[in-house]
Image: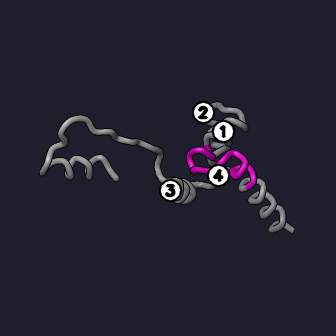
Amino acid sequence: GKLSELSTSLEPRPARGEITLLIGPEAPADARTQANSAQSLADRVEELIRQAKLDRKEALKLAAKERGLTRRAAYHEIVSGQQGEVNSDE
């Protein structure tokens, strides 16, 4: 849950002793939905190359991580998208 939810749940009965918080990445489905709605994977890779001055491999790795994908899955997504563009031109 959210940190605000934790705070609310601890108000009526404060924690006694130590507590452990596990903090992880955003849920992959949420990250993928947000990222895909904003721009395509290929566009994001190009943006990272231009703005962050990354090489193509590093840009692809970072864009994949933002979407909760492996680098290989991101590569296949870009390649299949490019093939779709070529086929639509014919």
Q: Which residue is mark 1?
A: 59
Query: Element type at marker 2?
Result: loop
- Picture coordinates of residue 80 (x, y %)? 77, 59
Q: Which residues are magenta?
A: 63-76
Q: Earlier in the sequence, mark 4 or mark 2?
A: 4
Q: Quadrant of residue 81?
A: bottom right
Marks 1/2: CA–CA distance:
8 Å
Marks 1/3: CA–CA distance:
18 Å
Rendered position, 16 above or below 72 = above
Please name whichever residue, 73 or 21, is drawn nearer the observer in this view of the structure. Answer: 21
Q: Which residue is mark 2?
A: 52
Marks 2/3: CA–CA distance:
21 Å
User: Neighbour class for label 1 at 10 Å: few (<14), some, many (≥20)?
Assistant: many
Using residue 74 as the reference point, say whether residue 83 is left or right of it: right
Q: Earlier in the sequence, mark 4 or mark 3?
A: 3
Decide: marks 2, 3 in contact (CB < 8 A)? no
Query: Element type at marker 3?
Result: helix
Q: Residue furthest left?
A: 12
Q: Residue at x 73, y 48 (%)?
A: 72
Q: Residue at x 66, y 47 (%)?
A: 70
Q: Which residue is mark 4?
A: 41
**Is residue 71 one of those drawn in magenta?**
yes
Q: Earlier in the sequence, mark 1 or mark 2?
A: 2
Using residue 33 as the reference point, say whether residue 87 is left or right of it: right
Q: Residue furthest right?
A: 90
Please, what is the three-letter code of the amino acid marked with disc 2?
Ala
